[in-house]
Structures are given as C-alpha cells and as structure tokens.
Amino acid sequence: MDLVFFGIQGSGKGTQAKRLAEELGYYIFEAGGELRKIRESGTELGELVKKYIDNGELVPFEIIMEVVNEAVANVPDDQKILFDGIPRDEDQMMAFDKILADSGREFRCVHILLDKDDAVERIKGRAEIEGRADDADQEKVLRRMDLFFEKTMRVIEKYMAEGKVLEVDGKGSVEEIYGRIKREIGN
Ligand code: ADP
C-alpha cells in the first residue's frame, strides 16, 4: 500500500517522509523536489516552472501531473511509493486518484497536524539552515501556507471522509513525531 503525506509548510513532512521511505523501503516521490529539478534544467519549461515556485504558487496542473504520471509508470508494481507534496488541490486529487487506480495501486494518507503559528516559527529556522530561496521570503511562505488552507485542506477532508487519513500530532521533536507516524501506520 502506498502512502501520501500531508502537512503544512514547516510541519516536518519532508523530513519525516524521507526517513520513513528510507527505513521502510518506499520509493519517494517528492513533488517540490521533482519540480526544482525541472526549474534547474535550463530549459524553457524550467523557466516557466521557476516563476511559479519563486512566487509560492502552484505549478500548472498539466506540468505536475505529467511528472507524477511518468514517475508512477516507471515504478515497478510491487514497489510501494511514498508521495510527498501531491495532490495539493481537488483537480490534482481527481487526476491522482485516477493515475493510481489505473495502475492498480492503493494508498492511505498521513496528515501531520501543526497549527499555523507553530509552522511559521519552524519555517524561520528552516530558512536559515537550508537556505531555500522560496523559504527565505516570509511573504511567499505565507502565500504557500494560505494555499495549504484554501486548497490542500479540502483534499485532506475528502480523503478523511473516505477513511483514508491517519492523523499525527506534529508538535515535538523529529524523533517523537516519527514514532507517532510509525505507530499510526502500524510499523
Ligand atoms: P512546500 O510544501 O514547503 O511548499 P515543496 O518543496 O513541497 O515545499 O514545494 C515547493 C514548490 O513547488 C511549491 O511552492 C510549488 O510552487 C511547487 N509544487 C510542489 N508541489 C506541487 C504540486 N503538487 N502542484 C503544483 N506545484 C507544486
């Protein structure tokens, strides 16, 4: 069974996803990472993607879904996947559900819960450590957080209604949160 990770910017989602994928043998699909590769590719598409990422906006539907489609097509059927950063809105959700269903894959979701004030504090620290351009600009980070509440939360609510979501408290140390995730997914 595949896993889909959700969490506001600063929730530690990416860190937890990478660690879990490594330990439990998931192939990790990191939407932001894949898009940053395209951004750096020196192509016309890269220039286009750059504009969206640098403004904290979602990259257009066709571009991200093509990347997801290709990734899923290239992963063997018996290799489980951990998706980080997809789907982020309801259009992506519909397309994502179809891609997975068409390849006979099933998934459940992990949502790392953190309130906005805590998330903003964490992001300040992360910008200093990792130096990610789109994290350094507070205004852009807040824009991404707004998108999370406006769009991604609807996706999470729909998956909740389908009984697919495991919720994990995102407060505490990386270790503590990791332990909670493993307990929730039954490992
Ligand atoms: P964060 O979750 O902190 O915003 P990510 O590394 O996941 O960071 O994403 C960085 C940027 O990549 C986003 O701000 C957005 O521009 C783009 N991106 C990531 N995932 C998606 C997606 N599913 N759809 C469209 N754009 C995306």
Image (tube, rainbow, N blue to C red):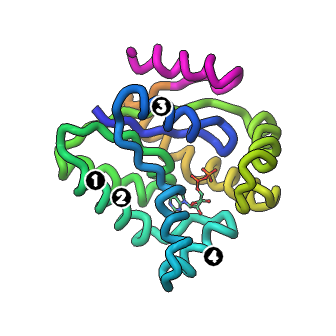
Residue 5, percent from left and from top: 48, 38
Residue under the point 33% across and 41% down: 81
Q: Residue 123: x and y, percent?
A: 76, 44
34 above or below 167? below
Q: Earlier in the sequence, mark 2 or mark 4?
A: 4
Q: Nearer the viewer, mark 1 or mark 3?
A: 1
**Near-viewer residue (103 or 165):** 103
Q: Evaluate if marks 1 and 2 touch, with contact meaning CB atoms under 8 Å apart.
A: yes
Which callout, 2 or 3, points at the residue further toward the start of the chain?
2
Q: Secondary structure at mark 1?
A: helix
Assign ligand 1 to one image quadrant.
bottom right
**Looking at the figure, which quarter contains the C terminus?**
top left
Rendering coords of residue 163 (x, y %): 38, 28
Residue extent of the magenta highlight: 167-187
Circle 1: residue type: Val
Residue 184 included in the magenta stretch of the image: yes
Q: Which residue is mark 3?
A: 110
Q: Residues within 10 Å of mark 2 (few under 14, many from 20)?
A: many
Residue pictured at 53% horizontal, 80% vertical: 42
| Label drawn at residue 51 | 4
Name the N-terminal-most of marks 4 and 3: 4
Q: Are marks 2 and 3 in contact (CB under 8 Å)?
A: no
Q: Are dots 1 and 3 in contact, CB under 8 Å?
A: no
Rounded to the nearest angstrom, the CA distance separating label 1 from label 3 is: 19 Å
Q: Residue at x 49, y 40 (%)?
A: 156
Mark 4 touching mark 1, by CB under 8 A? no
Label whose residue precedes the other's in the sequence (1 or 3): 1
Residue 72 marker? 1
Which label sits on residue 68?
A: 2
Three-letter amino acid code of the residue under disc 3: Val
Kindly report the distance in space between the C-alpha atoms of the residues bearing marks 2 and 4.
Answer: 20 Å
- Determine the CA span between mark 4 and mark 3: 30 Å
